[in-house]
Image (cartoon, helix red, strand yellow):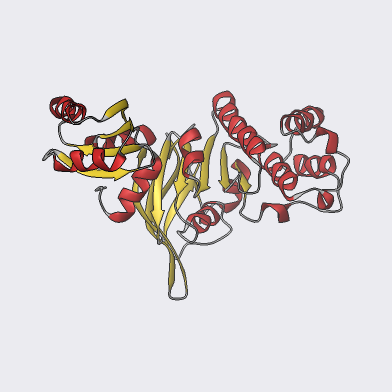
Amino acid sequence: MDEITTTGLTKNFGDLVAVDHIDLNIPSGTIFGLLGPNGAGKSTTTRLLSTLLRPTEGTGTVSEYDIIMEPVRVREVIGVLPEESNHTLYPSLTAYENLEYFARLYDVPEDEIPERIEELLTFMVLWDRKDDKAGELSTGNRQRLALCRAILHRPKVLLLDEPTSALDPIAAKRVRELILELSKKYKQTFLINSHNLPEVQRVCDRIAIIDEGKILLQGKTQELRSKLLAKQQFRIRIVGDVDKAGSIAKSMNFVEDVKQEVDSIIVTIEDPTENNSSLMQNMLSQGIKIVEFAEEEATLEDLYLEVVKGGIEK
């Protein structure tokens, strides 16, 4: 079952088309990454799905509730970490009091509230700060507390806008671990907005690439990355003259592209099964000392750049 769907979802702000007729299908239990640069339409999409904005055209559903006709029901089944998450907390209340207040607001069973709060604050290394006022916490700690607030009531769907943007590497790693754990334990569905390619690649099993309000490509992360394998890029690390190695590679008619780095060249090869050995033999015969000849793994960054350039079809 699809937990989130949109059909022709569009949002205009005057002459600006922020979200342009997007169609999304996000299966239940999926960690879905909406990937794109700042201003691409990611946050507006989240606001539409969370019913904070009303579409100009099109519609969508969250857990089969219509975002236009059933906004209250939608809000009952979602947890939201908005872009301005630091402003979703009460600064005069302590970290614990904030979570206690929102737990009651979302009808978390009274006897479960203390345990849930302690579990989340401990995991996010905030338990020692539970009695500190939210307004006195650092930006990173407020971000982590806001994430605790969003997931405290164990919603079916979580809409997270740049969840690690204000965090140091250790805290960001904890957030990624928490997302993976919640997805596995409670089968929750996540829509994560991000412009952080490595982060999306680590946690998301499906992605959509959005730019200028339009979905350029979407599908399973591994399937989309596999589209790049036809390029067959290889890193050849050498000891010696990198310029000479690059010239040799460029002279071979089956080599499509050569990029040079400090101690390596990265080559794009047609039919590598047939041609890799020829390239290697040619380089060795001309005195090039090869210490590594390995396939470059396709990344989401490669995919993103190819899609934006128009090099990969939908």
Residue found at x 74% / y 35%: 108
Residue found at x 35% / y 50%: 305
Image location (x, y in percent) of residue 103: 76, 39
- In the rendered image, the quadrant that contains the N terminus is top left
- Residue 37 visible, this orientation: yes
Q: Nearer the viewer, residue 133 or 290?
A: 290
Residue found at x 47% / y 75%: 14
- Residue 25 visible, this orientation: no
Residue at the extreme bottom: 15
Q: Is residue 43 above or below residue 123?
A: below
Q: Is residue 7 above or below residue 111?
A: below
Q: Nearer the viewer, residue 85 or 58?
A: 85
Image location (x, y in percent) of residue 200: 48, 40
Q: Is residue 46 above or below residue 64?
A: below
In the picture, measured across the screen, residue 79 lies left or right of residue 215, that is right
The quadrant holding residue 127 is: top right
In the picture, measured across the screen, residue 211 lies left or right of residue 42, that is left
Q: Nearer the viewer, residue 55 or 246?
A: 246
Image location (x, y in percent) of residue 224: 32, 38
Residue at the extreme right: 131
Residue at the extreme left: 253
In the picture, measured across the screen, residue 163 lies left or right of residue 203, that is right
Image location (x, y in percent) of residue 15: 43, 75
Q: Nearer the viewer, residue 68 or 227?
A: 227
In the picture, measured across the screen, residue 98 lies left or right of residue 27, that is right
The quadrant holding residue 102 is: top right
